[in-house]
Image (cartoon, grey):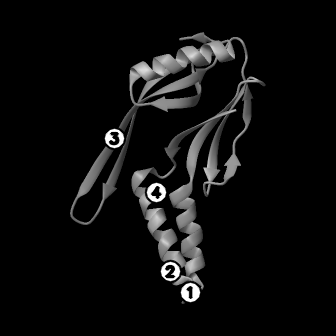
Amino acid sequence: MIKNKLDKSFGAGGSSTGLFLFIAGLATTYYSLIGIVFIICGAFIGFTFTCSIIDISKKRIKFTTYLFGIFSTGKWIDIKSDMKLGIKKSNIGQRISSRGSSLDIYNKDFRIILCGIDNKQIVPIKKFDTIESAKKELETLTLQLGLARI
């Protein structure tokens, strides 16, 4: 089983805000029970992330969201011989605003994706910073899973 962490569900700003809420909740719980609400909200926002799990022996893939960083959601997708693997350039942007200014953050990376018969994207599998490392891993995965490339 290969586990590949992809993205934080609420982005970098949400993750840091969630962590702040979590820590504030821990400090506040000693004085008030409202801290428990902060802990739960902060843990959800700060620790939730997306991930893909590849089971090579059973030839299946699961795109999942780990709620609170612990509880897995999602369904297994059986890999069929007519599916393909490809590389897609990803450019995910986020805007973080405050009273006086806003900050745009763009995460540019390359992702290996599983595609169906019609070459439509089914799930992302793994992400990389460079195209060379993505191509190298694509070769490995096509051999391990017995799939064609796009």
Q: Nearer the viewer, mark 1 or mark 3?
A: 1
Q: Secondary structure at mark 4?
A: helix
Outermost residue to the bottom: 31
Q: For mark 1, what is the residue?
A: 30
* Residue at 69 percent of width and 42 percent of height: 74
Q: Residues within 10 Å of mark 2 (few under 14, many from 20)?
A: some
Compared with 58, 63 (above or below) is below
Q: For mark 4, what is the residue?
A: 15
Q: Secondary structure at mark 2?
A: helix
- From mark 2 to mark 4, how far is it between C-alphas? 19 Å
Q: Is residue 21 left or right of residue 77?
A: left
Q: Nearer the viewer, mark 4 or mark 1?
A: 1
Disc 2 marks a residue whose amino acid type is Ala
Along the line of sight, the residue nearer the viewer: 74 or 43: 43
Compared with 90, 96 (above or below) is below
Q: For mark 2, what is the residue?
A: 27
Give the number of the disc on residue 106. Answer: 3
Outermost residue to the right: 58
- From mark 4 to mark 1, how far is it between C-alphas? 24 Å
Instruction: Tell me where residue 45 appears, x and y as whole percent.
Output: 52, 60
Which badge, 1 or 3, comes first in the chain's sequence? 1
Which badge, 4 or 1, comes first in the chain's sequence? 4
Disc 4 marks a residue whose amino acid type is Ser
Which badge, 2 or 3, comes first in the chain's sequence? 2
